[in-house]
Image: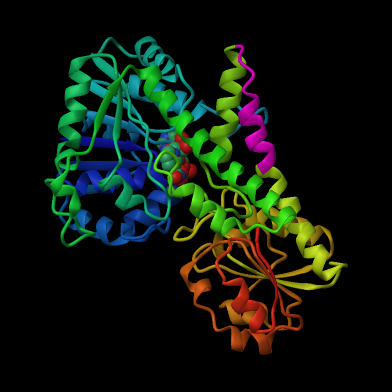
Amino acid sequence: MRIAIIGTGYVGLVTGTCFAEIGHTVVCQDSDDRKIEILLSKGMPIYEPYLEELVKKNREARRLSFTRDFEEAVKSSEVIFICVGTPPLQNGDADLSAVERVSMDIARCCDSYKLVVEKSTVPVQTGKWVEKTIRVYSKGTEFDVASNPEFLREGSAVEDFLHPDRIVIGSQNKKAENILRELYTPIINGSFNCPIHKNCLSKKETVPFIVTDINSAELIKHASNSLLAAKISFINSVADICEKTGANIKDVAHGIGLDKRIGRNFLEAGIGFGGFCFPKDLQAFIRISEKCGYDFKLLKEVERINEERVTMVVEKIKGALWILKEKTIGVLGLAFKPNTDDIRFAPALEIIRRLLKEGAFIHAYDPKAMERTKEEIPEVVYCKDPYETLKDADAMVVCTEWDEFIKLDFERIKKLMRRRFVLDGRNIYDKEKMLALGFEYVGIGR
Ligand code: NAD
């Protein structure tokens, strides 16, 4: 099938590449010329495990191409995926101006039947507006609108796309549903040659393909992210209680998570959630509820608890170092999670800004996210590795649980630091071992 991807970011590039990988012909378009230029010159605008190899492979197989030309992308395709950003506005609403722009442009270019699919995360009832916009601005060409929310996680996006827990389709009619079912068939049946796993488990099971109306599909996405965010704020609150009572959040989370009704995922206490999804989707869901006349107090609290995590971290550092002015703090991890270079709404950046305001000197390192952070916070000293970051530091603060940080040589670090204070914001180290090594160790909820 011929597919156009409009918006070649984290979701668009992964979606386009994976569709090409399972045999479709895909053209990816973006309004950011710089991004397309990088891809046309065989570079990568983002980091995501396996993505670079798959882009190269599918480009060479002529199943994947990139263009700046919107009209060319739309006219040459039967299915058009809208994957543009839906960032938060000042009031928490999702900014849907890019979705509207793309809908109007699709209407202008439509010359034969198109299935227009919202993959961007959008508030419930956006599909109705996309449909209306295309209808009003087009010259009467036949089209359908469908919703296909994306659940991939950055850091494991390719794997998640090829092996999803479920595929959700919101559709107005059988025709749209059937096109999307056909498009996803290799993934549903696990009948593609998996480029990641040798003996791919997916071949043994089929992926649930859930078809709903468009409003329900849109709601599934916002409700899923809000529930996951709630789980994180819940466990962070329990971590605070652990600190006050001498319990250990690691054991408590393990004990809770083994209950199948609850599950072990998203029960890691820490410095809070970030990224381009949870904070903005939570806000958008609160705003949607308000507009429907429902005050979603539960989610407001989830958001408040998360925002307070940054203050909690700064207070813990102050609790150990007393005065932050002119203290050197080595920050390990800038990305909002491991295996990505994405720093959007990353708690590390907010923590750094607060520490800088207090007059601290910040040295920082991240395996993938330094270039992006440099543009946002130039006053930080960016280092070549964790050891350079911690040289003469008064404190080490772990903000992202990269594998590289789990395996650090603490005998070496001991000799490098001016003061051996470690704030383990992701609970990745063994507290007893750190104390035995001679570090002052503070974790979260332990
Ligand atoms: P992104 O910022 O990485 O990518 C969006 C792209 O859209 C950008 O490259 C931008 O230049 C492009 N764009 C904006 N306006 C355009 C236009 N008019 N025409 C063509 N291109 C345009 O964002 P992302 O992380 O890929 O997220 C995209 C959507 O997917 C959002 O709604 C997000 O909530 C949702 N989503 C993201 C994730 C994730 O983990 N990042 C997961 C699931 C869903």
Is residue 372 visible to the viewer in this orientation of the structure? yes
Q: How is the image coloured?
A: rainbow
View quadrant of ligand 1: top left
Q: Which residues are magenta?
A: 293-305
> Where 265 sits versus 340, above or below?
above
Is residue 112 visible to the viewer in this orientation of the structure? no
Instruction: Please tell me which residue is depicted at 22% across the width and 38% down the height of the picture.
Output: 207
**x and y percentages locating residue 79 in the rendered image:** 24, 29
Residue 372 forms part of the magenta stretch: no
Q: Nearer the viewer, residue 283 or 406?
A: 406
Residue 302 forms part of the magenta stretch: yes
Q: Residue furthest left?
A: 191
**Direction from residue 122 to residue 58 in the image, left or right:** left
Instruction: Please tell me which residue is depicted at 76% across the width and 76% down the height of the picture.
Output: 394
**Direction from residue 5 to residue 91 in the image, left or right:** right
**x and y percentages locating residue 198 in the rendered image:** 17, 62
Q: Quadrant of the C terminus?
A: bottom right
> Where 45 sits versus 92, above or below?
below
**x and y percentages locating residue 71 in the rendered image:** 31, 31
* Chief SS of the magenta region: helix
Q: Quadrant of the N terminus?
A: top left
Instruction: Please tell me which residue is depicted at 72% across the width and 65% down the height of the picture.
Output: 379
Which of the 4 image quadrants contains residue 352?
Answer: bottom right
Instruction: Please tell me which residue is depicted at 44% across the width and 24% down the height of the picture.
Output: 219
> Where 282 sits versus 335, above or below?
above
Q: Nearer the viewer, residue 176 or 397?
A: 397
